Amino acid sequence: LANEVNADIVVGTDPDSDRLGVAVRDNNGKMVLLNGNQTMVIMTAFLLEQWKRNNKLTGKEFIGSTIVSTPMMFNLADAYGVECKVGLTGFKWIAKMIKDFPELKFIGGGEESFGFMVGDAVRDKDAVASTLLVCEIAAIAKAAGSSLYKELENLYVDFGYFKEHLISITKKGIEGANEIKQIMTNLRENPVSELNGERVVFIEDYQSSKALNMDTKEYEDLKLPKSNVLIYYLADGSKICARPSGTEPKIKFYMSVNMPIENVEEIKDADAYLSDKIDNIIKDLNL
């Protein structure tokens, strides 16, 4: 339908209208689906820029994200002098931040699974306000001779090219549940020391509420509530998260890799390089 009417943008929501998916035209005019991390970054960056232009940034503001979402959110927060608070998966944790930090103003935030919250009026992921926001961004970009896709590319130049990948493995029945349990046990008891030739420098285990520095062998306490999630951080800034689903017979692996780029012309090569990196991590984890 988008091609029939020559649309610039497609927005779809789920039946209860809390998640949204956005498709836009790339530089070749082909319609491409943005992932949840990309839509989250585009909307957050736009909100931050608007707050800055309206002189509303005082250093007492924050954006919200989750432990399995793109670390690019931290780069945005640093650039605008606001905090980036990270919670467990599930939007109730982002909404809870507003209550837990009344001295700070909430700008916006999201998670990789296509959820976003604009401001604190609706304290849950909200596709209604998010649809309005993403259409506003697209309209402003088009009026300036740009596009939503080009705006995303510009963000990659400014804040680093981030590429995320999700692998979801289904293991049904009691046997499957035991397999998933064993995968997590193996990752905990026999931690990987290297992936794609890069050292594992930090391991966060949200079940034990401990983080291990692999260089010093010292432990730190994690402040978030307990959850069956394990995150590996590599020396090159890559991040790999393992998390069994709470509602389905699945175990999910979230991967995030990144590299700096100087201009949009470097995106194609950067994407190929990071795709290889993700493939190597998948092989090393035997997924």
Image (tube, helix red, strand yellow):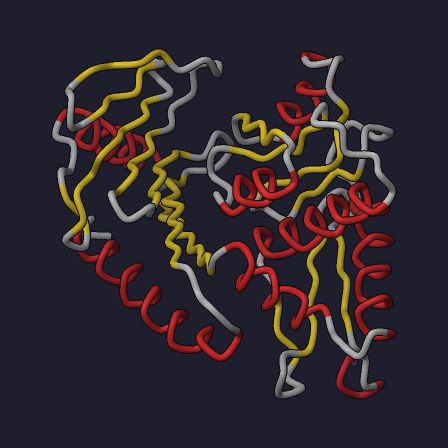
Q: Position of residue 168 (x, y in %)?
A: 40, 49
Using the rendered view, name the quadrant where residue 279 is placed.
Answer: bottom left
Name the residue located 27 percent from the left edge and 29 percent from the top edge: 203
Q: Position of residue 272 (x, y in %)?
A: 35, 73
145 relative position to 154: left or right: right
Residue nearer the viewer, 178 or 61: 61
118 relative position to 273: left or right: right
Name the residue located 41 percent from the left edge and 38 percent from the top edge: 249
Using the rendered view, name the quadrant where residue 91 is placed.
Answer: top right
Q: Position of residue 253 (x, y in %)?
A: 36, 45
Using the rendered view, name the quadrant where residue 280 is placed.
Answer: bottom left
Above or below residue 242? Residue 43 is below
Q: For the N terminus, which image quadrant?
A: bottom right
Above or below residue 260? Residue 202 is above
Q: Position of residue 261 (x, y in %)?
A: 44, 66
Above or below residue 139? Residue 252 is above
Name the residue located 61 percent from the left edge and 66 percent from the top edge: 154
Residue nearer the viewer, 239 or 30: 239
Image mark count: 0
162 relative position to 63: left or right: left
Name the residue located 24 percent from the left edge and 52 percent from the top edge: 287
Residue nearer the viewer, 22 or 120: 120
Residue nearer the viewer, 192 or 238: 238
